[in-house]
Amino acid sequence: MILLTGLVGVLLVLTAEAKVGNAEGTECTETKECLLYELVCDTGEYEVRKYGAAKWVSTKEKSLTMDLAQMAAFKRLFGYISGENERGKKIEMTAPVIVEIPEKNFWERVNFTMSFLLPSEYQQNPPRATNDEVYIHEMPEMQMYVQSYGGWMTSFSDYYHARCLKDVLDEEEAMYGTKYHYGVSYNSPMTLFNRHNEVWVKVVGKPVCSSSGGMFN
Ligand SMILES: *[C@@H]1O[C@H](CO)[C@@H](O)[C@H](O)[C@H]1NC(C)=O
């Protein structure tokens, strides 16, 4: 029993260490730490990435549009990292910030879930939030189809790029998660240039890495 507990402990330490780390050379240009991943392939139209399990601090906001939900959700999570947690800790901002965006009709109000990645220092033992709308959430290991774009992430740009990515995936007959996708951003709202955003769509089954759009297929 003791041995088993020890082993689980070692495994937890190993997984936590590898997944959140130094942002140098990554898409995270404004933070010290970033969610790291393994690039499975890059077809030119999309990438397939493998992410390890990691802990996030999350909050849900029910709204008609992501733009409205983002503001309230961001404020709540920013409160958590500014000290609204049971240890009164100031926690460093990391990247990316992700929003789980349900696929919906435009008139439907749904829950948008925004999450900040916890820095490596807090991956093991994050303080609980004092706001009961804010919670710690562990996302399991996952593979994502990823398309990147510049400018600002808005309901419109996110919808457009999610649609483009899914059209390409449909052409490839790739299987993917259809209940929601993620809107992923890497920059402070104050940053004007070289902004980077992504759409993530969950890989279902074996990832498809070919690209039939190319001349050689
Ligand atoms: C949104 O989240 C709240 C709180 O977790 C839950 O009670 C509600 O059923 C959810 N609504 C939808 C539309 O998913």
Image: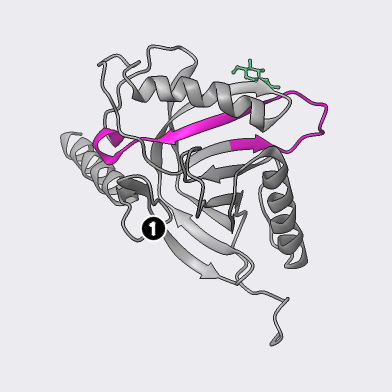
Query: 13 or 106: which is nearer to us?
Result: 106
Looking at the picture, does residue 61 appear above or below residue 205?
above
What colour scheme was applied to this rendering of the protein? one colour
Residue nearer the viewer, 79 or 173? 79
- The picture quadrant where one finds residue 184 is top right
Residue 102 highlighted magenta (yes or no): yes
16 lies left or right of 136: left
Q: Residue drawn at (81%, 32%), measured in percent from left and top?
A: 106
> In the rendered view, would you say 93 is above or below 127?
below
How many numbered markers are drawn?
A: 1
Residue 200 at what x, y percent from top left? 59, 50
Whether the magenta-drawn stretch holds residue 98 is answered as: no
Residue at far front of view: 192
Estimate the x, y position of residue 62 in percent, counting from the top left.
Answer: 66, 21
Q: For disc 1, does the CB lie below 8 Å from ligand 1?
A: no
Residue shown at the point (24%, 36%) measured from the top left: 121
Q: Is residue 82 left or right of residue 199?
A: left
Q: Which residue shows up at 37% across the image and 46% down it?
A: 30
Could you tell me the amino acid type at mark 1?
Answer: Thr
Task: State the residue at coordinates (31%, 47%).
Answer: 15
Badge 1 is on which residue?
26
Which one is nearer the viewer's eye here, 84 or 194? 194
Task: Where is residue 183? Give x, y as percent.
Answer: 59, 43
Quarter of the view holding residue 43: bottom right
Is 98 or 136 nearer to us in this picture?
98
105 relative to 15, above or below = above
Q: Quadrant of the C terminus?
A: bottom right
Highlighted range, magenta: 100-123
In this rendering, position of residue 172 left or right of residue 123: right
In which quadrant will I find the N terminus?
top left
Find ligand 1 in the image and state its quadrant: top right
